[in-house]
Amino acid sequence: MIGKPMLKVLGILLGLGVLMACSLISPEASFAPTHPQELGAGRPVCSECHSTDVAKGALKPFASFDHTTSFVKDHRFQANQDLNTCASCHAQSFCSDCHGGKVPMKPSLRLSGRPDREAPHRGDFMTLHRIEGKLDPSSCFKCHGRANNQKCQACHR
Amino acid sequence: MKQRTGIALVTALVAATGWSQEISVQGITIAQMWKQETPGFDKATYTPATQYLGIDATKLGTDKLSLHLFGWGHADLGDSSVLGGSKSGGYLSYGYLQYQFDKANAELKAGRFAVNQGTGFEQVDGVSARADLRGGFTLSGFYGLPVLYRTVDSLSQADYKFQRDIIFGSRLGWRSTKGLELGLSYLQDGAKAAKDLHHPSATDYTRKQVGVDLAVTPTTSFDFRGRTIFDMASHRAPAAGVAEPSKLAEHDYTATLKLGGAVAVSGTFVERNFFAYFAGTNLPSLFRQDERDLFRAWGGKVTWAAAPSVQVVADYRRTHRETYGDANRAGADVRMDFLEKTVLAGVGAHWVSVVDSKLVDPLTPYRSLSHREVRAWVLVNKGKLSASLDGIVQVYDSGNPYVVGLRTVYEAVGSLGYQATSSLKVSGDLAFGSNPVSKHETRGLLKAEYRFGVGKKGGQ
């Protein structure tokens, strides 16, 4: 049983903690929750308009968010560090096209009318996975290691 | 989360959209049909229908509060198209309330949401918070129940549920105005180890990971990013004479240098120790920690904007897996757009040359995993019509044990779409192919996409 003096100490500590936490919060305005202008078709190149700007919050040049081929393939780094920058243009459902704990069909089938998007597993990946899986099973693990592997379990038991 | 609790929560979340001043609903209905005749098996006709549904409701009483839901359901009108024989199913990908503050990029989330911290993608039923702090620091964290998936059998499922009883994690980052970001993160998935079971299991479904991430972007022409992840869980002592496994799960780094406005050169390095990297898998028979294997790769890419509407990418990657050998992967892609992006097109070719293959098949070792791949596609958007054609061909070496003597495997997909109204688009696909399972394959797919409301997000 905690005594009254201990409760007082805990209350004071909690109050101080909240006050300290509030004083620690940055006074800077948040990054825009939505991009103010609608973007055209194709992959956006942020630095075409934001040539010298630094993205607020991310504190990185907008050029590092240019949607080049490298960016699209390595977007995991940006998603880890600067998710709110991604969120100004992309709804969470855009990520869910590929990244889901369970998806009912492979992303390339779901996006079959969008060959411009880098949807994984195009073509007969069922054959190819036996080779790719041997060369690098860690690339399979990212999506199928802990989730989304019910179909894998049909053979890999 | 129990099914009844989940249904009640989702119902409450959907009902909450009634308070919204701005609501956006996106849905996609996909109907497929294919027939399969495989020697030795019964003939089957598959007609699965899949429905995706997403709701984004903003300004729930206040401008800062919003609700986001996304999930799917499917039903088989013919034979069951999924493992286990079930003819219907569904899944809630996410469903959460979000409160975004005006300052400090601060936000709170509650419900089912995704976290992409650590080695992968986590789904959590719980709460999360993030905020920028003074001095360039940023702090985020989450806490809740892990979303559970299926394991291979019911006994493993019981162990899996027992062990994955909680998930939480946090990341502390620091950003300088000179273009440097450093991050330190921790993730714990499950608090009960396999040894705590009534019948101790050999499989540990839990994880404890510490990650370090880095970004160096001092100018608009240079970008270096990456992360290193360690497995911090204590494991059973290895057998006598077997070395202690490495705690290093992953190194993953990429550097990009832009030369002028037209050329960018990037280099990557990846190393993964399977014992540490595969920690927490729910499919240990496939992602085998006991192999103690190591994967390492390095490579580079040159991107050249040959003209304002033409981008050429040449890439090379050398991969090394201790048990299976080395491979060289090289190729090039060209992406183009014409008529103010009314027409987008691409063509690419890649070679995978295995230089030191081992153990491909225990009975017939040293067979090559080498292959080549060519892909070409075009997408046209003109007024209310859209059309695309996408062809991919893979050519394997003779003697490859996985292609039953076929050598060439291909698939071509044609798609035609019509934007009937501003909210509704209908489209149809026809796919032809040849592969080791079906010498000739034809598949059809009908799709209806609709979007109501004011939401603009969602990507192109």
Image (tube, grey):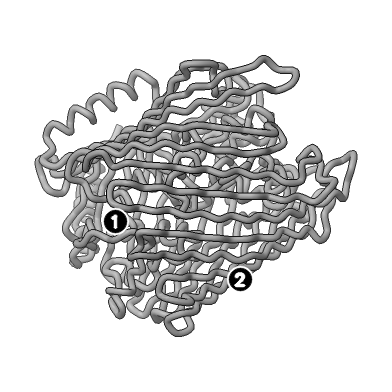
Rendering coords of residue A87 (x, y %): 30, 54
In the picture of the structure, the residue carrying the numbered disc 2 is B300
Q: Secondary structure at mark 2?
A: strand
Residue B206 screen position, x and y as percent: 56, 39
Q: Which of the pair A103/B238 is nearer the observer?
A: A103
> Pointer 1 indicates a residue of which chain?
A
Whole-angstrom CA distance, mark 1 to mark 2, is: 29 Å
Q: Secondary structure at mark 1?
A: loop
In this view, the residue in front, B225 or A113, is A113
Question: Would residue A70 be found to the left or right of residue B418 on screen?
Answer: right
Q: Looking at the image, which residue is at 78% across and 58% down?
A: B354
Question: Callout 2, which amino acid?
Answer: Gly
Q: Quadrant of residue A100?
A: top left
Label 1: few (<14), some (14–19) or many (≥20) C-alpha neighbours in 10 Å = many
Q: Chain of mark 2?
A: B
Q: Position of residue B385 (x, y in %)?
A: 33, 46
Q: Residues within 10 Å of mark 2 (few under 14, many from 20)?
A: some
Residue in the image at 44% along x and 20% along y: B75
The reply to whether residue B190 is visible in this rendering is no
The amino acid sitting under disc 1 is Cys
Q: Give the residue displayed 71% in from the left and 58% down from the top.
A: B352
Asked if both marks, 1 and 2, belong to the same chain, the answer given is: no
Is B23 rendered above or below residue A18? above
Residue B267 figure quarter = bottom right
Q: Residue at the location (47% across, 68% down)?
A: B214
Q: Is residue B449 visible?
A: yes
**Residue hosting label 1:** A89
- Residue B260 location (% of width, % of height): 44, 85
Q: Is residue B449 above or below residue B274?
A: above
